[in-house]
Image (cartoon, grey):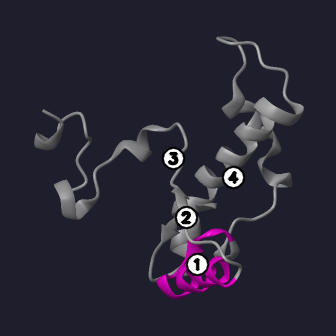
Amino acid sequence: MVTGFSVHADAEEAKRRGEDGFKFFGYALAHHYIFGEHKPGRTDVWAAYEKARAKLPEAGAARGIGTPEQLRAHLKSFEDSGVDQVAFIQQGPPRPAFFRVHPRAGGGADCSTSPASR
């Protein structure tokens, strides 16, 4: 089973951090396999996603995005259905802010200048 993954003590913060990337992942898959007309090197899937974003369903606790308690409940529903393996999707949107180091890991520095990237 594949599910989203964005967890925070505050469900709204988890959603803010993870929903856009998870929705883009689903949109990009659908673009390539269901409805899109792709021209390699020319098609801008992100731009198409941005146009469609408001019409897409929300991604929340039922998709692995929320509080630790919500994630546990989400995974328990898989277990109750007989699922014994889960792959988590943590898709980041293509924007510079995504490539920042977590404050505890490097003071919020840009990865290209952090000691860990050298």
Return the residue nearer the eye: 100 or 67: 67
Q: Residue at x 61, y 62 (%)?
A: 3
In this view, 13 is above or below 38: below
**Residue 86 % position (x, y):** 55, 64
Identify the amino acid type marked 1: Leu
Question: Pointer 1: what residue?
Answer: 75
Question: At 57% from the left edge and 71% from the top edge, which residue is drawn?
Answer: 84
Chain-order first, disc 1 or disc 2: 1
Instruction: Give residue 87's position: percent from left, percent from top.
Output: 53, 58
Badge 4 is on which residue? 23
Foreground: disc 1 or disc 4: 1
Q: Residue furthest right?
A: 35
Disc sitting over residue 92 in the figure: 3
Horizontal and vertical percent position of residue 77? 67, 82
Q: Residues within 10 Å of mark 4 (few under 14, many from 20)?
A: many
Which residue is at a point 48% across and 72% down the rendered structure image?
7
Please state which amino acid type lies under the numbered disc 2.
Val
Mark 2 Cα-neighbour bin, 10 Å: few <14, some 14–19, many ≥20: few
Question: Looking at the image, is mark 3 or mark 4 earlier in the sequence?
Answer: 4
Q: Mark 1 or mark 4, which has the lower sequence index?
A: 4
Residue 55 part of the magenta-drawn span: no
Q: Is residue 33 above or below residue 59?
A: above
**C-alpha separation, residue under disc 1 versus residue under disc 4:** 19 Å
Q: Nearer the viewer, mark 3 or mark 2?
A: 2
Tell me the element at label 2: loop
For label 2, the residue is 86
Q: Are marks 1 and 2 in contact (CB under 8 Å)?
A: yes
CA gap, disc 3 and disc 4: 10 Å
- Of the numbered discs 2 and 4, the one sitting upstream in the chain is 4
